[in-house]
Image (spheres, helix red, strand yellow):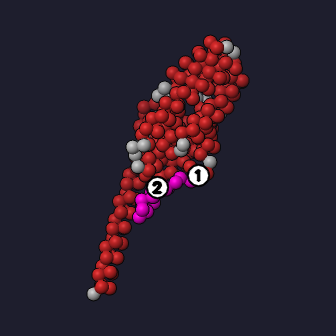
Amino acid sequence: MTATILLSIGIVFLAELGDKSQLMALTFALRYRWWVVLGGIATATAMVHVLSVAVGHSLGAALPTEAIALLAALTFLAVGLWTLRENLGEDDEDDTPKVSRFATAAPFLVVVSAFLLSELGDRTMFATAALATENDWFGVWIGSTIGMVIADALAIAVGILVGKHLPERAIGLGSALLFLFFGAMSLTSALAPDLGALPAAALAAIAPLLAGAFAWWCRRRAVAQRGGGRAEHAVERADELQ
């Protein structure tokens, strides 16, 4: 069993390097505490991989991957739009950072549901199912879960380091744009599976670019309005003093 566990760790770890799961882990690490993100990833991974090793590759291939991809896309888009909305408000006078409702409500459930939807039908699930056909299923389950957690832990570490050097609002806007990209990418892949990775990524990039431009316009407008209000207040005070 030890050999099976080590084999599964190595295969899944290599499969996850550069995968969207690592980018998702980095994004979540910018918003939530690292142990919440890591716990959510471990829980979702264990659930998905126990399914893949239990039912085998044949049933795994028959999962409704299109419906799952659409649901995942809607989830990412909803989280991205909500996060963007939270970070478009005007700055407080004391510049106190705002706390996301997602961060205070149920971040663990958000991470679990996002990774669960993302990993169902993913290449890692099929690789785990394939390993389970020729190796001990329990060893494959343990090894594949550990391998994915290790790979995503590296991304979480990067997110923690980046988060220490960025302001709260920049982290929030960056997270929102990344979530929008993931959602648009999942939606494009589900609706046009034969499009190819690079064209799909190019199309998906339109969503965060438009959202970023809209966010920039809203910020400029808010600053202009705030500046105009202060000027009017100054004039009124001057009139009162006279």
In the image, 230: left or right of 158? left
Q: Nearer the viewer, residue 110 or 77?
A: 110
Marks 2/1: CA–CA distance: 14 Å
Where is residue 207? Give x, y as percent: 45, 45
Position in image of residue 166 (x %, y %): 40, 46
Quarter of the picture containing the C terminus is bottom left
* Residue drawn at the location 67% of the way across and 14% of the way down: 1
Does 90 appear in magenta? yes
- Secondary structure found at label 2: loop
Is residue 238 on the magenta stretch? no
- Does dot 1 land on a helix, a strand or a loop? helix
Q: Residue at x 48, y 34 (%)?
A: 157
* Residue 100 visible in this rendered orientation of the protein: yes
Question: How many residues crowd mark 2 within 10 Å: few (<14), some (14–19), many (20+)?
Answer: few
Asked if residue 171 is positioned above or below residue 239 in the image, the reply reads: above
Residue range (magenta) = 86-102
Identity of the amino acid at label 1? Answer: Thr
Q: Identify the residue under disc 2.
A: 97
- Main SS type for the magenta part? loop
> Residue at the spot x=44%, y=50% of the render?
168
Q: Earlier in the sequence, mark 2 or mark 1?
A: 2
Q: Residues within 10 Å of mark 1 (few under 14, many from 20)?
A: few
Callout 2 amino acid: Pro
Q: Which residue is mark 1?
A: 104
Image x and y of residue 71, in percent: 61, 41
- CB contact under 8 Å: marks 2 and 1: no
